[in-house]
Image: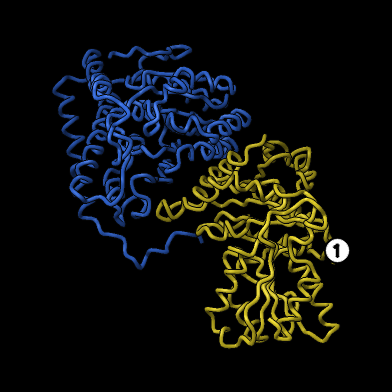
Chain colours: A yellow, B blue
């Protein structure tokens, strides 16, 4: 099968869906001739024109609200927020409006929109362009939150998100944009709320999100050399969450390491730990549930400091080894 | 204090667009609003209402005059003081009152209450609890309506309080940029909760602000039903014909406090009484009588009819079932 990048997979999903469904349109900053800050929408303005690629001035609140309003009357907008940090500016419309309209109106409305946004550190963009705020939105009933790791997942999950009748926050990772993988040319969807076992193993379950899935897979390769057989589970969508796949994996291995880039306190790892602790997997645990996550700091600029702010492959290897050897 | 229209609507007069039937309908709606609000207050005082409320008594001409200009297939999007807007958009009074009472058969199944009454199918995209929250959404509705090209428009209502938010600034810019069929209607009732709007702007200045963003705008005497109607009629025609957004500022006043916590410490009784002397309902009755649309007797009968309908709605609401706890998690996600 052909290989394309994560970024191209996202663009292909949007392009194919816009060709298929007239109600889909894009709205965001510099998504027109500029092609988006990360070039995700490159060429789409030329193909679809200004009527369906709505390039906006700096108006995170306004454009997110515009997507919400358009969705409320049955359009399927895809809003791009250039950096996840700027979703803080869009939150009023996303959290108070888009997420709540259906429930607030007695189940008689729907808001089928997607808000795409790149998160994560590693580009030297410092405190205001590097955050991973996914769990802020996981906390809001009415929203769905999706975090693809591979190009294949990115395309299938984005198509599913656009066709979903609810507001979906689609969290991309900047460092994944150029990673390559096999992606079918035809359109296909991956249901939201279906985890994927990215690697099978018997000694330890690693549940990781976004780029930490890739790092965990690398870590698993190294651990395999030491005879440690790691299973890597990627929830892919955080809300709704496929608890079944996670619980089954932990029951099998008896040990679990949770890895994410976001700050540990209040992060999604706490939710995962809670889900596991409350489940029948609890009785199978042979070691404490361990979280490896971002430090309790903003993302610093300096390269060394930045790398040390979030888990790297070596940290995952070390932590996984400790758990397997019952040193935690 | 007799108010003259501060700014005359621009453009040609379209002649008489109000006849006996329209006058009757508009007076009835204004009485229904007045009666609904008075009933809401009574029910609250009687301990029958769980939450708070924001009453629009004194602002009836703004709601009715504005919404009387659009078609049933057009949309409105309101604000937290939105009972009058719903009624002007032909809401079913029973379902509205049932929602106010938090009942299962209310518009929002008792989930939204006073501040969130909506009827999406009927073109009412809801009242909103966040000041300025409706403005960006209205732009998006406009984007969708423009793409669908069926000649529909949306009236986006907000207050003077919303005009100071960042959402207003962003929405004005996007509306002009995308040339959307949105008529923004600012109901300047002079206070954002307790903050006196004249401390930072006026209705004329708000209209001027919109003009700076690049859209036509006009300030009206918001207690004069016909002045409001004439201004909004022109704005709707402008938006519907694809020329883009328009702002109308209705200068008006709320007789009651901001909500139930208001002790009126920020304004005087004299000021309230002055505004009561320019009651939009009484003013319209005078005009309707002068123009021989309605006799005093007919107007009284219309008043009785309005109050009777609200009384019927009250009984309907009080007899309606409560939502069940078993259904509490329904409606968060669409299938």
Front-most of residues A302 and B250: A302
The residue pinned by badge 1 equals: A2
| Classed neighbour count for the residue bearing mark 1: other residues with Cα under 10 Å, few (<14), some (14–19), many (≥20) | few
Can I make out residue B20 in this image? no
Residue B84 in the image: state x and y as whole percent. 32, 35
For the point 40% across and 32% down, the residue is B192
The answer to whether residue A74 is above or below residue B60 is below
Front-most of residues A205 and B98: A205
Front-most of residues A219 and A323: A323
- Quarter holding the C terminus of chain A is bottom right
Residue A114 in the image: state x and y as whole percent. 62, 52
Residue B211 in the image: state x and y as whole percent. 55, 19
Residue A71 in the image: state x and y as whole percent. 55, 47
For the point 82% across and 87% down, the residue is A227
Q: In this view, does A259 lie to the left or right of A4?
A: left
- Quarter holding the N terminus of chain A is bottom right
Residue B86, image quadrant? top left
Residue A44, image quadrant? top right
Identify the element where label 1 is drawn: loop
Q: Is residue B192 left or right of residue A21?
A: left
The chain letter for the residue carrying disc 1 is A
The mark total stands at 1
Q: Is residue B81 left or right of residue B180?
A: left
The answer to whether residue A5 is above or below residue B182 is below
For the point 83% across and 62% down, the residue is A180
Can I make out residue A29 in this image? yes
């Amino acid at each position: 099968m052909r290989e394309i990048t994560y970024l191209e997979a996202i663009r292909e999903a949007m392009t194919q869906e816009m060709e298929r469904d007239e109600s889909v349109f894009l709205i965001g900053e510099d998504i027109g001739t500029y092609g988006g800050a990360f070039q995700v929408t490159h060429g789409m303005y030329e193909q679809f024109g200004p009527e369906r690629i709505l390039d906006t001035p700096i108006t995170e609140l306004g454009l997110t609200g515009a997507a919400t309003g358009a969705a409320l009357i049955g359009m399927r907008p895809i809003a791009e927020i250039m950096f996840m940090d700027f979703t803080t500016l869009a939150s009023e419309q996303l959290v108070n409006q888009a997420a709540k309209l259906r429930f607030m109106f007695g189940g008689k409305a729907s808001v089928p929109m997607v808000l795409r946004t790149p998160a994560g550190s590693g580009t030297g963009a410092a405190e205001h362009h590097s955050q991973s705020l996914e769990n802020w939105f996981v906390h809001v009933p009415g929203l769905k939150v999706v975090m693809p790791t591979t190009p294949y997942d990115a395309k299938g999950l984005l198509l599913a998100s656009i066709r979903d009748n609810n507001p979906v926050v689609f969290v991309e990772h900047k460092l994944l944009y150029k990673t390559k993988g096999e992606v079918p040319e035809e359109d296909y969807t991956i249901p939201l709320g279906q985890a994927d076992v990215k690697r099978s193993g018997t000694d330890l379950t690693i549940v990781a999100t976004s780029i930490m899935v890739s790092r965990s897979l690398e870590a698993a390769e190294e651990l395999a050399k030491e005879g440690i057989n790691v299973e890597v589970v990627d929830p892919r969508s955080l809300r709704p969450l496929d608890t079944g796949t996670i619980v089954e994996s932990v029951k099998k291995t008896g040990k679990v390491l949770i890895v994410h880039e976001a700050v540990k306190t209040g992060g999604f790892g706490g939710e995962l730990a809670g889900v596991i602790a409350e489940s029948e997997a609890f009785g199978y645990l042979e070691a404490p549930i361990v979280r490896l996550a971002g430090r309790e700091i903003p993302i610093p600029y300096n390269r060394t400091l930045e790398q040390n702010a979030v888990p790297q492959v070596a940290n995952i290897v070390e932590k996984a080894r400790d758990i397997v050897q019952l040193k935690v | 204090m007799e108010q003259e229209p501060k700014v005359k609507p621009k453009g040609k007069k379209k002649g008489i667009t109000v006849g006996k039937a329209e006058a009757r309908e508009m007076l009835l709606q204004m009485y229904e609003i007045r009666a609904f609000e008075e009933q809401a207050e009574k029910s609250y005082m009687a301990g029958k209402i769980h939450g708070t409320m924001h009453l629009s008594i004194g602002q009836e001409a703004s709601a009715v005059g504005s919404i009387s200009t659009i078609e049933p297939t057009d949309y409105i999007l309101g604000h937290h003081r939105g009972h009058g807007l719903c009624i002007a958009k032909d809401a079913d009074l029973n379902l509205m009152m049932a929602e106010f009472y938090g009942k299962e058969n209310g518009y929002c199944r008792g989930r939204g209450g006073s501040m969130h009454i909506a009827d999406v199918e009927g073109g009412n995209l809801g009242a909103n609890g966040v000041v300025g929250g409706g403005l960006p959404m209205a732009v998006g509705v406009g984007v969708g309506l423009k793409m669908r090209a069926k000649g529909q428009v949306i009236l986006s209502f907000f207050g003077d309080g919303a005009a100071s938010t960042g959402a207003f600034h962003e929405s004005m810019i996007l509306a002009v940029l995308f040339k959307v069929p949105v008529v923004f209607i600012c109901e300047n009732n002079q206070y954002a909760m307790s903050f006196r709007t004249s401390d930072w702007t006026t209705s004329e200045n708000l209209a001027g602000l919109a003009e700076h963003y690049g859209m036509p705008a006009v300030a009206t005497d918001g207690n004069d039903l016909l002045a409001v109607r004439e201004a909004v009629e022109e704005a709707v025609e402008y938006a519907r014909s694809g020329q883009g957004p328009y702002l109308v500022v209705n200068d008006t006043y709320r007789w009651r406090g901001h909500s139930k916590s208001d002790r009126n410490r920020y304004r005087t009784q004299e000021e309230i009484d002055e505004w009561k002397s320019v009651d939009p309902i009484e003013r319209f009755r005078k005009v309707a009588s002068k123009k021989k649309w309605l006799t005093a007797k007919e107007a009284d009968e219309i008043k009785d009819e309005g109050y009777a309908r609200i009384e019927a709605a009250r009984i309907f609401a009080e007899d309606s079932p409560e939502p069940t706890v078993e259904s509490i998690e329904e409606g968060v996600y669409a299938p």
